[in-house]
Amino acid sequence: MSAVLADWLDSEGDLLSWRRELDRLKRRARARLFRTLLLAAFGTAAVVFMVARRVPLAESRILIRVTEGNVLRDDQPISGRDLGLFLEDSALSNSHLLQIINKRGLYPLERARGDFYALDELREHLTLEVYRNYFLEARGYNSDVRTARIAVRFRDLDPEVSFAVCGDLARLIIDSENARREESSRGIADVTQVAVDSAVATLGDRQSELATKQALLEDAKRADKKDDIASLQVAISRLRQDVDDLAEQVRKVRQNKAYADLKVSLESQKINLFYQIVDERPPPPPPEGKEIRLAMIGLACFIILLPLCAIAVGAFDSRLHDEEDVQRLGLTVVGHVPRFPGFVIGSMRGRRAAERRRT
């Protein structure tokens, strides 16, 4: 067998070349043309079905503009960290997002498994982008008010649900930030009130002590006690300096308290920082001409799959079609009898046909 194979390889040196392999596969696929076309059509139909079944998510977008007020001037950067991450941690917290999920009835299957899965699904469809954030920079003397842009995007299969949830998220950011800033300013006002009370109490103590020392000084002068007069005068001088310092401190803390109260009033009225929705974009309508697009996809897939199916059919066909198939078995071909009338008589196909006719 090895000698025969060696002689065959020597006589047919280019038998295993890629061109001859492709020609052989083409002949074998042509012998089973119906099966090749059927496989290509089935693959094309599967691809077209998957593309037609896939529905793209409808994306809504709402733009929020944040503008600084002119009543209270703040020259320092308002936030030293990424505003987007800050909003995700504060406004878009899990508790707030769960309220939207329960309100809109989103993700029932994920909610049945647990709130964590529903929140994870919502965050995958939510995008929060902050750009043109000038609050990160210090405000110059003659510069305009600082602004920032917050873009909220949400995707869902239902366009109406997408736009409604996107609006809920935008209003959630605005309401949460207004409430947070008002609460923060009230906390600062409470701290400054404690500082005012402490400074006023300390000032009152020093004023009482000063009045007591002055009364003792008058008694020492009437009794002509020179040593007591000198020591009391020194103590009174120090107390007067302390009283003056404490009075200045009380003035400053009262000024800070007035500033904090004004900030609380502005924050409660949403004047110090404006959050305004400036653009609302619902999901765009689905593109027209879907049938034409599917037809083009189907044609392209059929053209690509047809040669691949031909190669697959030809490669897995184990029948003998020509002399080359016989040579690949290591057998020597003596001759080839072409087809002639009645060549199927006595063959397996002819016997089966005769058997069917008899029955």
Image (tube, rainbow, N blue to C red):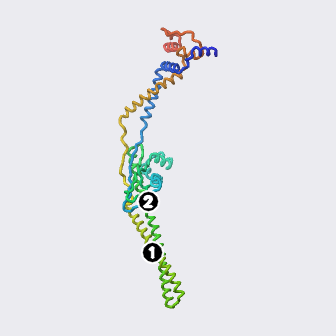
> Does residue 98 show up?
no
Kind of residue at disc 1: Ala
| On screen, residue 212 above or below 106 | below
Q: How many marks?
A: 2
Disc 2 to disc 1: CB gap under 8 Å: no
Q: Residue furthest bottom?
A: 223
Q: Residue furthest top?
A: 341
Q: Which residue is mark 2?
A: 76
Give the distance between the C-alpha atoms of the residues marked 2 and 1, in whole angstroms.
29 Å
Mark with earlier residue (2, 1): 2
The quadrant in which the N terminus is found is top right
The image shows residue 52 at horizontal and vertical percentages of 41, 35
Dot 2: element: loop
| On screen, residue 266 above or below 305 | below
Kind of residue at disc 2: Gln
| 217 and 46: which is toward the camera | 217
Label 1 environment density (alpha carbons within 10 Å; few <14, some 14–19, many ≥20): some
The image shows residue 53 at horizontal and vertical percentages of 43, 36
The image shows residue 84 at horizontal and vertical percentages of 45, 52
Q: Which residue is mark 1?
A: 247
Dot 1: element: helix
> Does residue 109 show up?
yes
| 174 and 239: which is toward the camera | 239
The image shows residue 177 at horizontal and vertical percentages of 42, 57
Give the number of the disc on residue 297.
none
| On screen, residue 323 above or below 299 | above
Query: Is 259 situated left or right of 332 in this image?
Result: left
